Each structure stands twice: as structure tokens, then as C-alpha cells.
Amino acid sequence: MPKLNRDARHPITLTVDGRSVTGYAEPRMLLSDFLRQEAGVRAVHVGCEHGVCGDCTIRLDGKAVRSCLTLAMQADGRIVDTAEGLAEPGELNDLQRAFRRHHGLQCGYCTPGILMSASDYLERTPQPDEEDVRDMLSGHLCRCTGYAGMVDAILDVADERARPDETG
Amino acid sequence: MKPKPFDYVRAESAEEAIAILADAGEDAKLLAGGQSMIAMLNLRLVDPGILVDVSRIDDLDYVEESGDMLEIGAAATQSSLQGWPGLAERLPLLDRAIPYLGHFQTRNKGTVCGSLAHADPSSELPLCLATLGGEVVLGSTGGERVVAAGEFQTGMLSTARADDEMILAARYPFRKKGEGFAFTEMAMRRGDFAIVALAAVATSDGLRLGVGGVADRPTVRDWPMLEGDALDDALNAFAWELGGQDDAHATARYRRELVRRLGRQVLEEAKSCRN
């Protein structure tokens, strides 16, 4: 592809939570900033901006990744999923319901990123044990409520999904 | 915490990336998974004129057998390596080390070759490459060359790669019959940079220990089959020779103690895993 000049804003198109979004970005624009400023996705939270805190975690082509360690340009033509797409507006999906039930959040700043990590993880590891879940959560920092409620919520959802008939 | 401006090219092939490197020289930086590079860009520790993105070169996104080694292409992620079906059986050291490497979320995007190129002294993949005696394939407009792990990393964040070269692939030797492996590390939190990381190999007649996080590069030492006090003495000598420094994370003395104690632990574990 041709070289993209540093001073210009270049059009990129990606699928965000199922809808096609076209926006403009300089090469240096981070995907986290593009999603918030160009795509209007406020569920992408920005914390440390160097890959440590996990607040900006989204799914890129299905995989949980840091959007602050991704350039907007790198997402051109790809599929991005955020916590805003987990359920219809006003609804919660099973993972979100479990977080509420188990008090898996307090201020909620870290929550959208954790939900995206957990949603990818549970698809690949449908029946994790507690140690597996804690290892996956090591990629996120929560500064208010701790991780016990999150671990319970994620294990509960794994159990629920293993018996789909009862949960409908 | 935002990068300075740079030009950007998404390379469609290794040839295209190499041509840009030949043209731009040290003004160009390669971008693969970005799990170190974009963090450094955000912190403004690097300031390239042009960023060459090799992460979507499909021909380089592979993990496959190459003779008695596993070859990992430049665009293959750490998750792809972790998911290679034969890993536990044929590359037990990597199988044990990868869970320590960052987090699930960073392994999904971070590449194996990018980690080698970044050459952090405490990083797990360069340590495993050095301990197993693997190799790195470099490409430039002049052709390809293969560099042995022992010659590849030349210091902290520096390698034998020239400005006009890119890493095309890395090769990790498979387990041979009779070898046992163990890996451990000490870090402040799971997934943090290792204060000390240790990789051990035991064979029928000898021991090998690779240590990261102390010297400016992963350092490997071979011994005959030692036991008891002789092994403790060898580890103590090695701990001093590594020449660790005090820094914000740990003192040199603590690092030496970790090499002595965890070194003993991983070597004993490697011995017990031999088959």
C-alpha cells in the first residue's frame, strides 16, 4: 500500500459492534482514541496508554487486545467489538448480569475491558477453573472492588453456558 | 502519552517491507504486534520517521516444523505459538514459559519475532531462544542470513539486526530424547517484567541454565551433571559473574540470591522431568 503521510488524516472503515464506521485518522492515532472520538464508543475507557491497565481492551477480529497498543490504521477493514455491543441498548447479556449479581464492579471504569477479555476467553476456554480465570484477569487492574466478585461472575457464566437448556 | 507524528506503511509482503528499510535506514521502525513498540511510541521513547507495519503479511503468519526446529514467521502471534498443537510435547520449555509472557490480552497481538527484535533483557522468548540454541532468520535486499541465538542479542534492547534487515522468522529446536526442561521467574505481579527469569535444561550428562533479567542479555551456562554442594557452588559463581545491578525493582544482592535459589529449583525440576 502507499505511504500514508504523517500530517494528513486518512479515511479508514471498520465494523464496530456490527455497524460500519468510517472515520479519519492520522497515522499516529491510537485505536482507543479513534473508537472514542471518531466512532463515539464511550465504553472504550483509556487508562494507562501503555498496555498495563487493560481498561481499553476490545476484541479485534474476535481476539481481546489492548486498543491503546493498536493504531487506528491497523484496524482498517477489520471487526471491532466493544462492551456496547454485548447486548441491545437497555439490556444486559449473561456476563453483564453475572457481574451485577456477584458485585463484580464498583466504579465501573475497568469493567468494559474486563467484559471483553472474559467474553473472548470463555469462547476459547468454556470451562475454566478459578486459577485460569485469575490468570486471565491478571491483564486488568481494578482499583476499587478487587477481583473476587469478577472471578465468581465469570465462573458462574461458564457454568450457566454449560447447561444451556436451563438458562434458555 | 500519544505518539509523535510518523509516516505509516502497511507492507503487503516481506519484499515490500525490506525495500522500505533499504530506502529509509534507521529512520524506519518495523511494527508487528506493537505490544512493546506502541507502548514505546506512546511514551515517546522512540521517534521513527516511518513505521512499517508487517503484522498483516499473510505469508509470514505461520508456525510450522522446519527440520528439527519449530519455525515461527514474523507475523505470528505469541498466542499462535501457544496454541501450536505439539507445543507441550515437543517444546516443553516454551510451553512452560509462555504463560509468564505478558498477559492473555497482549499475547493475542504480540508477536514472537517482535519480542526477539525488542530484546528486553528480562523477556522470556529471547531467554528460551538462547537456552535452546535457536536461530533467527534475517532478510534484506542482499538476501537472507541465519544468526544463532548466542550471537543475536548483543545487549539491552540491541541485536545483531542491521537497520536494513528485518526478522523473517525464528526457529526453536525441538526437545531431544532424554532432555528435561523447567522454567520459572520472579516478578512483582503476574505478567510484569521479570526481576529474574530462569530456563533449565537437563540431559543425560549435563545441565544448562539460562538467566534473564540480570545481565544486559539472556546468559546461558553449561555444566556437567552436578549435585549437592558442587551445584550450589556453580550457581553462586554464575550469580556473581552475571554482574546484576541495583535498580528500582530489586537489588543486585537479591538478584544473585534468586539465581542461586530458583536456579537450584529449576535445575532439579528439569532433572526430574527427563525422559
Image (cartoon, grey):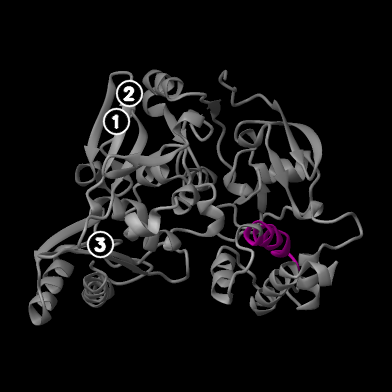
Q: Chain of mark 3?
A: B
Give the mark, 1 or 2, whose residue is nearer the N terminus: 2
Q: Is residue A156 above or below residue B171?
A: below
Q: Which residue is mark 1?
A: B162
Quadrant (top left/top right/bottom left/bottom right) for the C terminus of chain B: bottom left
Amino acid type, residue under disc 1 in the picture: Ala
Asked whether the residues under marks 1 and 2 belong to the same chain, the reply is yes
Q: Residue at x 73, y 60 (%)?
A: A112
Magenta stretch, main secondary structure class? helix
Q: Position of residue A121 (x, y in %)?
A: 62, 60
Residue B227: image x %, image y %?
11, 78
- Residue at x 21%, y 58% (from the top left corner): B177
The span shown in magenta is A108-122
Residue A110 belongs to the span the image colors magenta: yes
Q: Are marks 2 and 3 on the same chain?
A: yes
Question: Dot 3: few (<14), some (14–19), or many (≥20) neighbours within 10 Å?
Answer: many
Number of labelled discs?
3
Along the line of sight, the residue nearer the viewer: B167 or A56 = B167
Q: In the image, is B85 to the left or to the right of B7?
A: left
Q: Return the residue at label 2.
A: B140
Residue B150, disc: none
Q: Within 10 angstroms of label 2, few (less than 14), some, or many (20 or more) residues?
A: many
Q: Which residue is denoted by mark 3 in the rendering?
A: B211
Q: Residue furthest right?
A: A90
* Residue farthest along the front direction in this orientation: A165
Q: Residue at x 68, y 36 (%)?
A: A78
Which label sits in the foreground, 1 or 2? 2
Q: Quadrant of residue A4?
A: top right
